[in-house]
């Protein structure tokens, strides 16, 4: 797997600044990942996001796209804008679909999934043996076909 140039991940309001990449670690069930800062065009960091490059059971609970917007910048749809840029990168990697998961109580993230045109797949209980169980007991799973 080769990581690609990400300098085109920008629009008139934000850009994604690549902070690191991580190769797959199959023995730990880790998939390849891009990590970004979400920045305004003037360079101010407003959050972070990532893209996991896998369409297997390994991303069922964590999803392909993750994002966090700093509290003082919330309400500007930066996670939506960043996710749209990440979809561009996912297509370059020939992913067939992208999964986004979020807590059923996270109204903002559920709304972002709908605004992205994601299809609601299911609400699942996170297995007690999964590393995400300490933070999430249930998740909504959304999918976007690419």
Image (cartoon, rainbow, N blue to C red):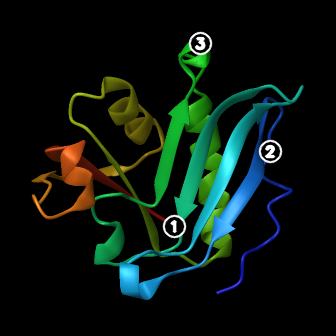
Residue 110's spot in the image, x, y percent?
Answer: 33, 34
Check disc 2 and report its element: helix, strand or loop. Answer: loop
Q: Residues within 10 Å of mark 3 (few under 14, many from 20)?
A: few
Q: Nearer the viewer, residue 28 or 53?
A: 28
Q: Residues within 10 Å of mark 2 (few under 14, many from 20)?
A: many
Tell whether 34 sits left or right of 142. Answer: right
- Tag 3 secondary structure: helix
Residue at 59% over, 57% down: 87
- Which label sits in the foreground, 3 or 2? 3
Relative to 57, does residue 19 appear above or below in the rendering? above
Q: Which residue is mark 2?
A: 10
Which residue carries the number 1 mark? 146
Q: Is residue 37 above or below residue 5?
A: above
Question: Where is residue 47 drawn, in percent x and y?
Answer: 62, 32
**Residue sitting at x 25%, y 42%:** 135
Which of labels 3 and 1 is toward the front?
A: 3
**Cα–Cα span, label 2 and label 1:** 19 Å
Q: CB of mark 3 within 8 Å of CB of mark 1?
A: no
Q: Is residue 101 left or right of residue 88?
A: left
**Labelled disc at residue 55:** none
Residue 63 seen in the figure: yes
Question: In this view of the protein, which residue sits in the foreground, 127 or 14?
Answer: 127
Image point (12%, 53%), residue name = 124
Asked which quadrant contains residue 28, the reply is bottom left
Query: If you read the primary sequence from the N terminus, does the residue marked by circle 2 or circle 1 appear first?
Result: 2
State yes or no: discs 3 and 2 in contact (Cβ < 8 Å).
Answer: no
Q: Is residue 132 above or below residue 110?
A: below
Q: Residue furthest right?
A: 42
- Mark carried by residue 72: 3
């Amino acid at each position: 797997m080769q990581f690609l140039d990400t300098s085109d991940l920008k629009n008139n309001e934000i850009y994604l600044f690549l902070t690191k990449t991580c190769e797959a670690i199959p023995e730990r069930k880790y998939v390849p990942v891009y990590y970004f800062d979400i920045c305004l065009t003037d360079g101010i960091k407003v959050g972070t996001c990532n893209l996991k490059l896998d369409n297997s059971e390994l991303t069922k609970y964590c999803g392909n796209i993750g994002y966090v917007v700093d509290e003082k910048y919330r309400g500007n749809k930066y996670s939506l804008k960043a996710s749209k840029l990440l979809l561009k990168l996912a297509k370059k990697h020939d992913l067939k679909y992208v999964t986004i998961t979020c807590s059923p109580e996270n109204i903002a993230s559920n709304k972002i999934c709908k605004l992205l045109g994601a299809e609601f797949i299911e609400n699942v209980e996170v297995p007690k043996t999964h590393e995400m169980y300490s933070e999430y007991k249930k998740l909504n799973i959304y999918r976007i076909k690419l």
